[in-house]
Each structure stands twice: as structure tokens, then as C-alpha cells.
Amino acid sequence: MTLLIDGTRKLRDIKPSRASVACGLLLAVTSFGACGDSSGPTDLRRAVTTLNAVEGIGLQAPAGTVLPAGPTVEVLDQNGKPISGEAVSFQVSGGGGTALVSRRTTNAQGQVRIPWLLGIVPGTTQRLTASVGGLSVVFEAHTIEALPGESYLGRNGYTEYLPGELPLVVSAPHGGDQRPAEIPDRTYGTMAQDRNTLDLALKIRNAVKARTGFYPYVILSRLHRTKLDPNREIVEAAQGDPESERAWWEFQTYIEEAERLVTEAYGEGFYIDLHGHGHPIDRLELGYMLSASDLANTDQNLSAQSYVNKSSVRALAQKPGIAFTSLIRGPSSLGSLFEGLGFPAVPSLNQPNPGSDPFFSGGYNTGRHGSRDGGTVSGVQIECNYPGVRDTDANRQAFAEALAEALEAFFPVFFDMELTATGQAASLDPGL
């Protein structure tokens, strides 16, 4: 029997003023098998006779992102009762993309859901097949182009993707405050929230837009760190919970899609992972995956290829004419630009290393999404002090404007480009 379902649903934005995302999806469900006889199986396992699609209907999503709901199926026995502990397999069957989890067992309600990463080409139909025994369900979803200025949410709004048009990507992993009951608390690792970093990231987005006329890409995690730590590998980050793992995948793949689009448009770009610290010295800590002991080296020693290779700005440092130490702590380095704008920072020309004081050198995201391990998007972790930067609305606004100004000076020196959108320069000419 083949059942064809057509429906529509809207994705709700974080702010009511933002336009909703129009949705449409065609779901084809193909079922095989028949109900068993009334006597049922003689062993302890009940016969799987029904596989239904229960979530993921009526949705589309930006290309290269995780479908924001579902795909979810339920497994029922011959009496229509859910079967728990039944392994369901998932496989992409058309259009590209990836089943980020290929096999998962049903929960107490007989349901199972996985994260489905859609292919990178907008305007295409994607297919995913879920199967158990002789039963199968085929989902069809449609990819759209992500539009700058819009907001796209992951499942239950746990993550948010704000597309841009500049070679600049900003993420904020630790500022969320949502504590949904469906996700158990993490039992180990750091749990502290980076206060006000989500608002700071949004102010940076708006400040860059006001200064350049174009948006950067911004990715936010809205889960509290007790539920998810997106700046850790998935085992520590989610600690085995499927919904936490899904939010982790959403966060990481939003960044990866943003960087893919940046690379496609510009050939290179810059990534900032935004954090907050509570260390005794009120200064910005810029993490390039270089430890305090690394930074304690002289400029000559720090210029060794071994330090370049371990840094998150490896690609940028290997460009012709760029000296690694100038990039890290020279007069035009990000730290020195911050200091010139009234925000003490390390490393910088005035503070070349943190000395014996506490210092965050960069974490999982900076290592993964910077250029240490390849690619042409270089990155830095910015740890912001609370007093003077994150504490008040006015201070957050001042820092956001300072960062936008610093980046506008940083890009021509090290990227040999203005911080503006490709193909848009002509539209900035008031004579046109």
C-alpha cells in the first residue's frame, strides 16, 4: 500500500517581526507487511507490523542544514501498540545529504528520530529512507536558499542560524538559558553559562551591518550548558542524549555550512567563537590555539612552523607577505586593534603574552572551524571579560561597535580585502 501526504507548516522565528519561513514538503510513505494472527509470536519479542511517519511532515529547510523537525517514525505491533528497543535504519536515498545517525532504537513510545543533514544545493528534492524488517518509510524534503537577514531555527528553537553575506562567521555556544525537561542534565564537564554572550553576538551582527551594510553569519546555541556544551566533542557535549546530540549537530553544521558559503564566495574568511571569562584581569583573551607558554616565546621562536601549524589562523599565516607574529600580536593584530579602541587584550603589541595569569587559548570550536586542520577560514576564540564588556547593554553595544571597527581595519591588512560583500561594492557608490 502506498500513501501520499501533502501538507504545509510554518517555522516560527525567534522574533515575531521576522518573516516566517514558508514551508512545503511531499512525504511518500511506502509500507510493506501485514498484521500477524491473533495468537501473536511465541517469544518475548512482538511482531513489527507497522512503521509510521509521525514528524517531519510539511517542512523544508535551507540547503546544507539539518531538517528542523523529524524525520521521526514510530514502530507498532500487530495490536497497534508501540514497540520499544527496536532498531531502525536510516539511509539517504536521493538528492544528497547525510543521515547523521544511521541506526537508532525506538524509545518507550516506539518512536525514533535522527538528525538529517540536507544536501548543499538549494531547490532540490532530498530523500531519506527509514526501514525496519520488511517495512520502509521514504521522506521527501525540499531545500531552499538561506537568506541574509532571516532567522532559521533548529528543532524546538534550541539552535539558531542567521545567514550572512560577508566572509565573517560568529558563533556563541555558551550563552543559552533554555533547560527543556526532555533533555537530561549533563553529569560531568563545565556547566557555567557565559552571561549575555547571545545578546553580544546579536549586537555584533547589527554593528557589522550598520558599519558595512551587510550581515555576518551568526550561529547561536540557546540551550543552557547544563543541557549541551557545543564547544566540546559530541560525547562530552551531549553525554548520550539523542536530542542534545541533535542540537550539537545543528550547531556544528550551521557553522560548517556558513563557512562553506564563505569559501565559495570569497575563497577565505574569518571565524569568531564568542565566549565570556571570569578571570581576575579584565581584558579580552584571544585564543589562536596557542598556549600561554607558546606565547611566552620570542617573536623569532614563535615564528617557527610548528607554532603556525598548531594555530587556528594557519591558512592566514601562510599567505605571502604575512608574518605570523604580526598576525598574532603585531600593530595591526586583532588584539592591538582592540587595545587602540580602549579594550585591553592579550596577545597584543602591549600584552604579547598572558604571563602566569589564567588564559583561554581556544577550544573545540576554534580547532574544528579555524584553519588548523585545513580549509581557508581562519579563526579565533574571543573570551570577553564581564565588567566593561558584557555587563551592561551600553557596554555590550560599545564592544560590538569596536569589534566591527577593528575587523574593518584587520581585513585589508591580512585578507587583502575590504570587509564588504562580494559583488556588492558597486551598489555602495552613491553616484550609481
Image (spheres, helix red, strand yellow):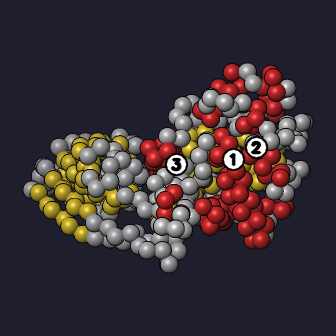
Percent from the top left, x then y, of residue 354?
86, 39
SS category of the residue bearing label 1: helix
Which quarter of the picture shows residue 78?
Answer: bottom left
Dots 1 and 2: beta carbons under 8 Å? yes
Residue at image x 18%, y 56%? 29
Q: Which mark is residue 410?
A: 1
Q: Which mark is residue 255?
A: 3
Query: What's the distance in space between the residues labelled 2 and 3, CA to CA?
Result: 27 Å
Label 1 sits on what residue type? Phe
Dots 3 and 1: beta carbons under 8 Å? no
User: Between disc 3 and disc 1, whose residue precedes?
Assistant: 3
Q: Which of 367/267 is in front?
A: 267
Residue 339 is left or right of residue 222, and the answer is right
Q: Which residue is mark 2?
A: 332
Mark 2: few/some/many CA within 10 Å (<14, 14-19, 20+): many
Query: What's the distance in space between the residues labelled 3 and 1, CA to CA?
Result: 22 Å
Residue 181 appears in view: no
Which quarter of the picture shows residue 23?
Answer: bottom left
Label 2 sits on what residue type? Ser
Percent from the top left, x then y, of residue 238?
56, 47
- Image height of 83 relative to 55, above or below: above
Residue at image x 15%, y 53%? 30
Q: Which of 84/113 is in front?
A: 113
Percent from the top left, x then y, of residue 323?
72, 30
